[in-house]
Image (tube, rainbow, N blue to C red):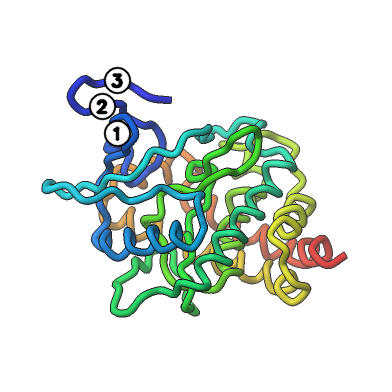
């Protein structure tokens, strides 16, 4: 979904932090540059040089603090999410794509003296750069399968399992039914979908046993992230929090995840 402006180019819809500030100009996309843009661009270029072709290629930085990246063609789903992006085939392909990213990133490392953003970073840290925000809004699809990842602004070092847990929150989704109903179709089988994602990624038995607990921790990190944005008066997060049930929603998610931990573990290991 896009709008046209002769001077700014084609405004690309979606996102929260950069909503209304991302534009396509032909083969390029221009967007606000994160504070660590030079290090992030170096990482994206290293991914490409190592064979990972499923991410934007950095073009450069502008004098007014924006970054230029190559435009990645395909379909991106926005909330409320349509059924085509939530098929079993689509879900499995997200796991496959995330595994490809991790296998490439593991050979690159995080780079020395980089101030990676800690907003959604793995609290245990790590030497491999995770995406940390693999939600439907940040995955480009072609022919019903995940083909590329975009928006690496929150990428930071961590464990591969952390990135899988973060992705599971959005793609299963790991939400109680009332919360999920706000932006997802009804009737999604969370335990079965969690198993599909794990199978697509190729998690080991040990990682499968750990995943439900890591998802609970990731949910707490996401809650803290929202709390900081709301405390700072960010109008986007203040509005979304109010529209989606306030802090009661987060309390409900926490209780639901804890109550179903064993169900998810059995589904992953059975």
Which circle's residue, 3 or 2, is located before the other in the chain? 3
Mark 3 Cα shell of 10 Å, populated few (<14), some (14-19), many (≥20): few
Residue tagged 1: 23
Q: In which quarter of the image is residue 258?
A: bottom right
Q: Distance between the residues labelled 3 and 2?
A: 6 Å
Q: In which quarter of the image is the C terminus?
A: bottom right
Which circle's residue, 3 or 1, is located before the other in the chain? 3
Q: How far apart are marks 3 and 1 (CA)?
A: 9 Å
Residue tagged 3: 4
Q: In which quarter of the image is the N terminus?
A: top left
Point 32% across, 58% down: residue: 41
Point 12% across, 46% down: residue: 64
Left or right: residue 218 compared with residue 172: left
Q: Is residue 268 above or below residue 115?
A: above
Point 25% across, 47% down: residue: 32
SS at mark 3?
strand
Task: Please state which of residues 165 and 143 is positioned toward the viewer in this rendering.
Answer: 143
Q: Disc 1 vs disc 2: Cβ atoms closer than 8 Å?
A: yes
Q: Position of residue 242 (x, y in %)?
A: 42, 42
Q: Disc 3 vs disc 2: Cβ atoms closer than 8 Å?
A: no
Task: Please state which of residues 261 and 57 is positioned toward the viewer in this rendering.
Answer: 57
Badge count: 3
Q: Where is residue 61 in the image (x, y as percent from the top left)?
A: 20, 50
Which circle's residue, 1 or 2, is located before the other in the chain? 2
SS at mark 1?
strand
SS at mark 2?
strand
Q: Where is residue 215 in the image (x, y as percent from the top left)?
A: 61, 64
Q: Which mark is residue 267?
A: none
Residue tagged 2: 9
Task: Please state which of residues 102 and 121 is positioned toward the viewer in this rendering.
Answer: 102
């Amino acid at each position: 979904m896009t709008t046209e402006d002769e001077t700014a180019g084609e405004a690309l819809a979606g996102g929260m932090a950069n909503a209304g500030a991302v534009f396509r100009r032909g083969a390029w996309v221009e967007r606000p540059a994160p504070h660590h843009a030079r290090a992030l661009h170096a990482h994206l270029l290293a991914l490409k040089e190592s064979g990972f072709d499923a991410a934007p290629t950095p073009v450069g930085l502008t004098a007014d603090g924006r970054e230029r990246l190559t435009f990645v063609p395909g379909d991106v789903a926005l909330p409320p999410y349509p059924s085509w992006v939530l098929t079993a085939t689509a879900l499995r392909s997200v796991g496959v794509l995330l595994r490809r990213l991790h296998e490439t990133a593991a050979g690159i490392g995080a780079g020395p003296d980089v101030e990676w953003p800690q907003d959604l970073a793995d609290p245990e840290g790590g030497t491999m750069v995770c995406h940390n925000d693999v939600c439907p809004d940040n995955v480009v699809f072609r022919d019903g399968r995940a083909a590329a990842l975009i928006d690496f602004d929150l990428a930071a070092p961590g464990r591969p399992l952390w990135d899988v847990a973060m992705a599971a929150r959005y793609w299963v989704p790991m939400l109680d039914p009332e919360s999920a109903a706000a932006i997802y179709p009804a009737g999604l089988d969370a335990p079965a979908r969690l198993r599909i994602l794990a199978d697509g990624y190729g998690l080991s038995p040990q990682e499968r046993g750990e995943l439900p607990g890591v998802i609970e921790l990731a949910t707490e990190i996401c809650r803290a992230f929202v709390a900081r944005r709301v405390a700072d008066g960010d109008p986007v997060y203040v509005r979304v929090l109010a529209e989606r049930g306030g802090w009661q929603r987060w309390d409900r998610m926490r209780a639901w995840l804890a109550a179903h931990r064993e169900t998810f573990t059995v589904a992953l290991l059975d």
